[in-house]
Image (cartoon, grey):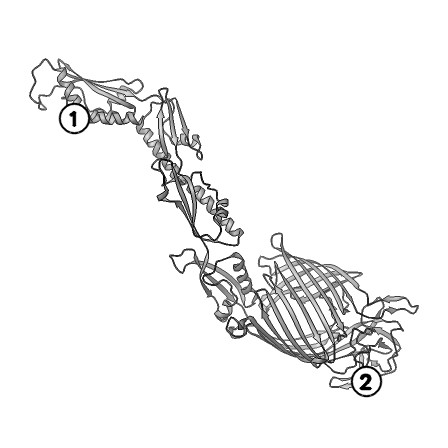
Amino acid sequence: MNSRLGRAGRRLVTLAALVTFLFPLATMAAPAPAPPSASSAPLVVSVDVSGNAHVPSDRILSVVRTKVGQPFDEKTVREDIQAIFDLGYFADQVPPLIRQRPEGVAVTFRVVENPVIQRITFSGNDHVSSDTLLALMDTSVGQVLNTSTFHQDVLKINSYYDKIGYGGQLPSHVSALNISKDGVLSLSIREGLTVNHIKFTGMPLLSPDLLKKALVTKEGQPYSEDTRDKDFEALKKLYEKYDLSIGDFEAGIDPSSVNTDKGTADLIYSIHVAVVGAVQITGNTKTKDEVVRRQLRLRPGMIITQGLLHRDYDRLNNLGFFEKVELNAKPGPDPKKPWESTLDWNVKEQRTGTAQIGAGYSGGPNGQGLTGTLSYSENNINGTGNGASLRFENGARVSDASLQFTIPYLGHTAASQKYSLATTLFTQNLNNFYQVYGASTTQAVAPNPIVSTPSPGGAASGSTGSAGTIPVVLTPNSDLLSGVAANYANRSTGLSLNVGRRMTDYVTLSAGLNIQRLATSVDLPAPYFLAGTTTLLTAPLQTSSPFGTTTAGSTLGITASSIANTASGQAFNLHSVTLGIASDTRDDIFNPRRGSNLSLTQEVSAKGLGSQFSYTVTTFDGSKFFPMLKNSTLGFHALVGETTGAVPPSKLFVFSDQQLRGYSQVFYGTEALLLQSELRFPLSPDRSFNVAVFGDYGSLRIRGADPIVDTFGNIVVDYNKWLYHGDVGVGLRFDVKQLGFRSIRLDFARGKGTTHTSFGIGQSF
């Protein structure tokens, strides 16, 4: 058909010569006239059309300007021929027949109609259906092919392909067409250039083979903007899989590779991973920029990973200095490098200093009476990140004072900031009432000749009385003595110093020194006395010391070579060193959702350190957290501890209602095992109010302890064996941010044969 259209165009060029030739033939018998003027030109006596089978003559003649009764004009006839051809229905035209008539000239326009379309077919349209293409066309079956209409149809098809992403690749997406004699219009479609090779430029970081596998576009297939967009989404997911982000992405045909004959070209993907261009700190008015920046691991020039972004967020949040931490990623700073981002860490500071003055009263056999408290703490002194706290407490049964300093980063160099320092000065005088349990007479190696005379309230007054005759212990067993309580006094004064060394962002080594002077006394109402004794750190039966005059006796009332007897009231020197390693990957130290917190420590006390005790205490403490459901957290906690030598009572492993929440008793051991689990459900969007379902399982033993037996010699309890205790319960967790309290805890639990409600500040683990 293209050749036919070309012939028709060429015939238009020679049309004037043909008309000039034919007109003299019609008037050959007459002498050749002079060139006619407008007034002497013959009149047109008739105008008609021949050769049209389907296109009405009226439709054809409507575009003809040569009219009956007007002078014949050769130029007008040539324009009429073009106008008829422009109707689009004709594949060719025969020169018009111009015949001489007595009255003038008869003009007959002769045409060759295009075929009537019987069917329209498409080939090469792999991504766009034939029905869609037909819907775009005004050309339809049953009509004479109109080349003008068809030309507009081709433009619509091209426009549609451009719209769906195939633009700019080919001059026309209708690469060829043909209409057969029987009226079948066939269109060959070339949707886009076929990809010959896929190339990657920029800084893709990942290997080309890995990138090609992720692409929707494959070599040997057409390229389009639609597949390009799908490729971008596929590449984003691939980079996210490797904890990376795409900072800049461009795709397109390589113009130098286009082969129009074969319809092929190379495809270039320019990929740059996201890189830090600059880091900004905004919103901080007190905290120094240096304090914030030393927590950040993403620095200018580094590749951005989601893991490092989350880690930096967690590190800032865990400082406890900020009410809110937000990351705003902005373009820049170099507009010529769109893959670089400016990380703007916007913080909202919160109060870091807390002053408290208060009073309290707790009565009953285990109460502390009336107490007053005065304290001040600041964990971000002058915005440096250093902390200090001062605390005084005084009351009927308590007298405490402590001064603590913490420097989490020593110095300003990268080497010095790997170290931290913490030191505490303290003095403590604490009297507690403890429940008393019966002991067998075999535990009383010798009757205690000096006991305290009970006060009217049942507690010891500290004065001397008659010899005790009923042995008791402070470690729980089935023989709980109702109405009897022991006044357990702990006194200690000392200094602790700890130096930490960061090995990585998560792992820290530590070394500590502890120097203190301690004493313990236990007073009981007559006729009770603490059973048992040890051969270690024995003391006079009655001792005067700076702490006062107290009675002698074993610390817990049991015979065990693993516990040093400090219950005489005499003061002892306790010097020890501590070595430890810890790893903390929690996302939030106050209310974690994921990560772990693991530590292994060993404390050593020996005479070579100037101590009156020789022992070791080794403790493993670990917790692990898993995100569950939508916002919930499942946590597990394990504590394993053991000792060697004879430890003072202050170094025993103690499980109170903070560890075994279903029991009001206090359990002691020189070896310990504790397993806990909690499922925490947040009830508020900011996770400041939670409900927890939990279970605890603990076991302790006192190494080398003699068993408690009844009067018949039956063993009541053997503390040398592992004693197990379990509970289940439900609890509430809530924050009081206005007062600086995080995760206030109220737990309701049921243990073996008992229920208990416990209160605490901070998560149980």
Q: Does 752 appear above or below 611?
A: above
Identify the disc placed on residue 439: none
Instruction: Note whether 740 is above or below 24 in the view shown.
Output: below
Instruction: Name the residue carrying label 2.
Output: 542
Amino acid type at image mark 1: Lys
Q: Secondary structure at mark 2?
A: strand
Q: Which residue is mark 1?
A: 75
Earlier in the chain: of badge 1 and badge 2, it is 1
Residue 636 as seen in the image, left or right of residue 242:
right
Query: Measured along the vertical axis of the image, is residue 587 above or below residue 569?
Result: above
Viewer-closest of 689 and 653: 653
Q: Where residue 456 appears, x then y in whole percent?
A: 82, 79
Instruction: Name the secondary structure under disc 1.
Output: helix
Q: Which class describes the residues within 10 Å of circle 2: few (<14), some (14-19), or many (20+)?
A: some
Tell me, yes or no, whether the two marked residues, 1 and 2, touch with CB atoms within 8 Å.
no
Observer-nearest of 457 and 100: 100
Distance (Cα) linking label 1 and label 2: 143 Å
In this rendering, position of residue 584 left or right of residue 485? left
